Each structure stands twice: as C-alpha cells, then as structure tokens.
Image (cartoon, rainbow, N blue to C red):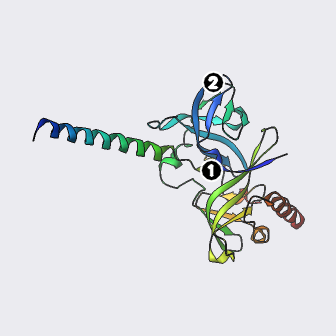
Amino acid sequence: MTRLLRTSEITGRPVVTLAGEDVAQIKDVVYAPGRGRVGAFTLAGRGLFAGPLPVALAWSSVVALGNDAVMIADEEVLAPLEQGVDQPATSGRQGNVLGARVLTDTGTDLGLVADVIVQVSEDDSACEVVGYEIESSDAAGSQADTLLIPLPETLSASGEHLIVPGSVTKFVRHDLAGFGAAIEGFRSHLGGED
Amino acid sequence: MPWWGWLIVAVVVIVLIVVGIMAIQARRRRGGVLIDPKRPKGPENTP
C-alpha cells in the first residue's frame, strides 16, 4: 500500500538514527524531474539558533519515512552537500518548484505551485513525485483556491515554468482522497495517446 | 541616565539581537522542493 504526502509534511521532520540520536531536520526535498523521484534531502540543524547543514541525506539512505520522524541507520550516511544543491534555496526562488508557474502544453496558465505531492512505496524504497498542489488561476476554471493535478512519470521542469500535458485538467482533484485514482487515470490516458 | 537605565537598554538590545538571529535562522531553515541541478532539463525530459 502506497502513501500520498505533501512535501510540506516532510520538511521540518526530525532525522533520527536507529540509536535514537536526533541529528537534524529535513530542510529541502531535492528531486530529479527526468526521473520524477525524490533523490535526496538537504538538512538543517535542530534548535532555535541552528541553520542549514552542509550535508545531504540521499533517499537510498532513509530506513523509514515515518509520520513523526525520518529514520536513518547512523550519522555516517549523511554525505557532504554536493556543489549547487544548496544554491537555489539561499538565492530566492530560483530552482525551487514552490511558487513556479504551471502551464499546459497548450499554453494555459493553471496557477502557481503551492506544494508537491509525493507517493511513498509501502517499504519506503521509493518516493515518486506524482502531483502538484496549485493555487489555481481563473484559467483553471475552478472555484476552489487550491487544486491537485497529477503528473506524468517524467516531466519538463526548470523551476521557472512547469509544463504539463493539457489533458491534465480532466483529472484535477480538490483533496488527496481519490487523487491516487486520478494519477492512475491520467497516466493510463497518456499511455493510450502513445 | 541612572545605572538601571543603561541596564534596561542593554537587556533590550540583547533581546533584539537574539530574536533577530532566531528569525534569520528560522528563515534559513525553511524548506522547499528543489530540482536536482545535476539533471538535464528542457525538452529531453518532456514525456
């Protein structure tokens, strides 16, 4: 059984070793749009005076993504932050998907990304990016302030504009209940077009 | 100004500095969803 989560529910969660040591908290979720999966997390220290840490946590090193903490084997799995990963977060919105504008490939502006929806596999072996929560624009044709739109398995993303297939508007949902079915329906629809 | 006046001023300045540092660090800890800069972007990633 897979779980759907908003990335805002993951950021700020403590990172705890299996020995019980609280070593950090999740800062940024880093994903590769070409693969559509979460690859790593950047980390921040714990406590009121702590800032970002110069280390990252690869998804492959996560033992479990729990409701209250992210479990890792030990502190040794934290790797030095690779060049460039920490740049976008400290220099405005560049490289950050949150706040980016979503356009369909037919040129319709759907709105701005407010959150990203991920699907975590039952054994926590994979964390796939499956949707965006967007602050809808008038063009999206909805009365609701926020909408959930499913994503294809791979997508074009630059952090400035996010391009999605125009048929996504048929699979819009307003909450996470039933969003899993919308993702499957959207991806089967795309598969049928090929 | 009496000595206790200077004491109050010093305490206020220290409190403001501490609150300012906490606010700056809280802002730096704020998360986002970043695109891995090592991955190619553009049409080659379009389905």
Please give the label number shown on residue A8.
Answer: 1
- The quadrant of the rendering that contains the N terminus of chain A is top right
Q: Position of residue B10 (x, y in %)?
A: 22, 38
What element does badge 2 sit on?
helix
Q: Residue at x 62, y 73 (%)?
A: A137
B29 left or right of A122 in image? left
Residue A123's image quarter? top right
Number of numbered discs = 2
In the image, farthest residue toward the top: A19
Residue A85 visible in rendering: yes
What element does badge 1 sit on?
helix
- The quadrant of the rendering that contains the C terminus of chain A is bottom right
Q: Position of residue A121 (x, y in %)?
A: 80, 43
Q: Nearer the viewer, residue A178 or A86?
A: A178
Please give the label number shown on residue A186.
Answer: none
Residue on which disc 2 sits: A76
Residue A165's image quarter? bottom right
Q: Residue at x 69, y 59 (%)?
A: A132
B42 left or right of B2 in image? right
Earlier residue among tags 2 and 1: 1
Circle 2 Cα neighbour tier, 10 Å, few/some/many (<14 / 14–19 / ≥20): few
What's the distance in space between the residues labelled 2 and 1, CA to CA? 26 Å
Badge 2 amino acid: Glu
Q: Considering only vertical position in the picture, is A140 above or below A89?
A: below
Mark 2 on the same chain as mark 1: yes
Q: Are marks 2 and 1 in contact (CB under 8 Å)?
A: no
Q: Considering only vertical position in the picture, is A149 above or below A29?
A: below
